[in-house]
Amino acid sequence: MTDSLPSIKGRVCAVPYRHEKKIVLGHGSGGKMSGDLIAKIFLPPFDNPALRAGNDAGIVQPDIHTQLAISTDSHVVFPLFFPGGDIGKLAVCGTVNDVACMGAKPLYITVGFILEEGLDLDILDKIVASMQTEAGKAGVQIVAGDTKVVERGKADGLYINTAGIGIIPFGLEIGGQFAQPGDLVILSGTMGDHGIAVLEARGELGFQTKIKSDVTSLNHMIASMIDNCHNIHVLRDPTRGGVATTLNEIAKQSNVGITLFEKNLPVRPAVQAACEMLGFDPLYIANEGKIITIVGPNDADKALRVMHNSPHGKDAIIIGEVQEAPQKRVLMKTVLGSTRVVDVLMGEMLPRIC
């Protein structure tokens, strides 16, 4: 929130702007501070219908026969390599998923590299090869790019910016604004794998796990879901800010309430253990290979079958439901039978995670 021009990551939140006078790490969290920054600084001068929708990709219609989804993303993850992936794979997957979550078929990607003086060319070779491999798997072409070099110590090796373009089948409408009361909320797998994998790569856990980042392109699974289900209303990859922040964004966009079932939330034991040790909640940890699907109740079983038949959705489960009220809020039914509010991410939990 996730979250860019023409689609600003972090999305727009109808909340008062925090009166910081300088940028802090929390402004890049994808949570409340990101939303405040966008609402105050970026949206007013750039305002247009594509941005105002608040999705991870902007929808534009250059002529009466064509709808395009366009997204852009910048990647500053540290370290450059982590269990299950690297900054190059992350860049391609993140852009593919943002476009695919609008119901589009991703086709083209552009890439911009900010390289630091002194970067080992072998490292750059590995990252570029990783990007090409992932682009091939996703079926997209890298069609344009740019390279800049900055002085030693200015870029932590390299940063990558990507933009993606895909075509939306005419008449298909999927977006955060289309959730309806009665819909069911499906999560395609376990929460927090990416964030914990990156933390381990930084040496910040204090113990070793076998957790790998879930980073992957989901466009093929999403396309199969759309082919088999006629009532998919929302698709969203819960990256920065995690599942909790993403669902709050959707609740605001659609003016609905969402209730989660704590007993259904999927978390790997190693991720849960790391979160308990660090004082984190897996609901707010970044994911890079999961999708939230909000679907009409009659199509939920179909969507689950498609996910379960994919290696990227074998742990998919219904985690909640959409209700009329309380509007713009996310609640959780706990395992103890109580109900609590699930708010957006406040501040910055894990900087430089994507």
Image (cartoon, helix red, strand yellow):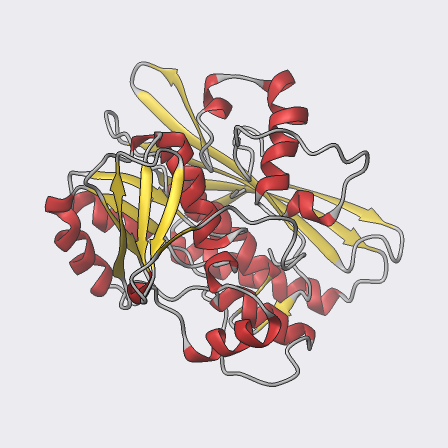
Q: What residue lies at 18% left-to-right and 38% top-to-bottom?
A: 231
33 w.r.t. 216: above or below: above
Image coordinates of residue 312 in percent, x first then y, are 33, 64
Q: Nearer the viewer, residue 284 or 143?
A: 284
Q: What residue lies at 81% left-to-right and 48% top-to-bottom?
A: 149
Image coordinates of residue 136 in percent, x first then y, are 43, 56
Residue 165 appears left or right of 277: left
Farthest residue toward the left?
Answer: 298
Q: Which of 63 and 31 is in front in this view?
A: 31
Q: What residue lies at 47% left-to-right and 74% top-to-bottom?
A: 272
Residue 31 appears left or right of 62: right
* Quadrant the C terminus occupies: bottom right
194 w.r.t. 185: above or below: below
Q: What residue lies at 10% left-to-right and 45% top-to-bottom?
A: 298
Residue 151 appears left or right of 133: right
Image coordinates of residue 278 in percent, x first then y, are 61, 72
Image coordinates of residue 145 in percent, x first then y, are 63, 41
Count of numbered labels shown in the rendering: 0
Q: Which of 107 and 302 is in front in this view?
A: 302
Farthest residue toward the top?
Answer: 64
